[in-house]
Amino acid sequence: MSIASRLKVGVDVPWVTSWSEEAQLGVAPCPSVDGELAVGQATKPGVGRPLYSRNHLFRQRKSVREMLCPMCGKPTAQGDRWSQTATATTAGELRTRGFGPALPAEMADDQPLLNCGAIAPLHRACADASLARCPHLGGMADRTLKPFPKAWVIIPLWIEAKPPSPLARGVPAVSFLQLVGVEDR
Ligand SMILES: [Zn+2]
């Protein structure tokens, strides 16, 4: 039997975090990626126990596509988007790492980018709260909150779908979405 947790989603546990009762499902067309094939996951946030190291597949994609704060799940507005874990990079560096096809061809190699990985930017208030609560974030050497730029690129991370999904015979499917901010020049 699944037990509702006393931990509150969006307060004690980030909205984007997976829960133990949220089983991974097969591959299917998903609205979070405009109907492309993506890996699904059951939706039962707050049931069982939180799996802090695992983002929920659907909520993660939704957070990046719709700029929802991964902590509270509500939309972030331009000017109140912050990242602690993002790292500075360039278009050239990402191209070297094989992400070239996801970047606009006309983007110069020296274009500064802010690689947020799979973590959409947070509200300032939510970032401050999670920094105070989360031992992992609090222990990071770089505790500076970086402002998220006005423009960005989304890079789908593909996996090879496997049976039992009948759709999945070596078909690529989206797992998570990677978010890369494009800095002003
Ligand atoms: Zn928030």
Image (cartoon, rainbow, N blue to C red):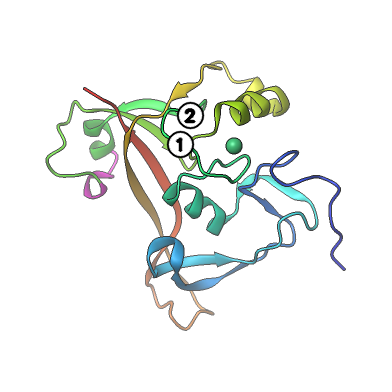
Assign ligand 1 to one image quadrant. Answer: top right
Which amino acid type corresponds to the residue marked 2 in the rendered image? Asp
Does label 1 point to a residue whose CB lies under 8 Å from ligand 1?
Answer: no
Is residue 95 located in the magenta-colored stretch of the structure? no
SS class of the residue under badge 2?
loop
The image quadrant of residue 24 is bottom right
At 65% from the left and 20% from the top, the residue drawn is 139
Tell me the distance, in whole angstroms, between the alpha carbons under discs 1 and 2.
5 Å
User: Is 11 placed left or right of 165 in the picture?
Assistant: right
Foreground: 32 or 26?
A: 32
Which amino acid type corresponds to the residue marked 1 in the rendered image? Ala
Is residue 98 located in the magenta-colored stretch of the structure? yes
What percent of the width, then of the height, locates residue 99? 28, 44
User: Is 127 placed left or right of 93 in the picture?
Assistant: right
Q: Quadrant of the N terminus?
A: bottom right
Tell me the residue that label 2 is attached to. 80
Tell me the residue that label 1 is attached to. 77
Q: Quadrant of the C terminus?
A: top left
The image quadrant of residue 105 is top left
At 34% from the left and 34% from the top, the residue drawn is 181
SS class of the residue under badge 1?
loop
Residue 144 vertical placement versus 75 (above, below): above
The stretch in magenta equals: 97-102
The residue carrying pointer 2 sits among few (fewer than 14), some (14 to 19) or many (20 or more) residues within 10 Å by Cα, namely few
Foreground: 150 or 96?
A: 150
Foreground: 42 or 150?
A: 150
What percent of the width, then of the height, locates residue 173? 41, 65
Residue 147 vertical placement versus 92 (above, below): above
Could you tell me how many numbered marks the image carries?
2
Mark 2 and mark 1 in contact (Cβ < 8 Å)? yes
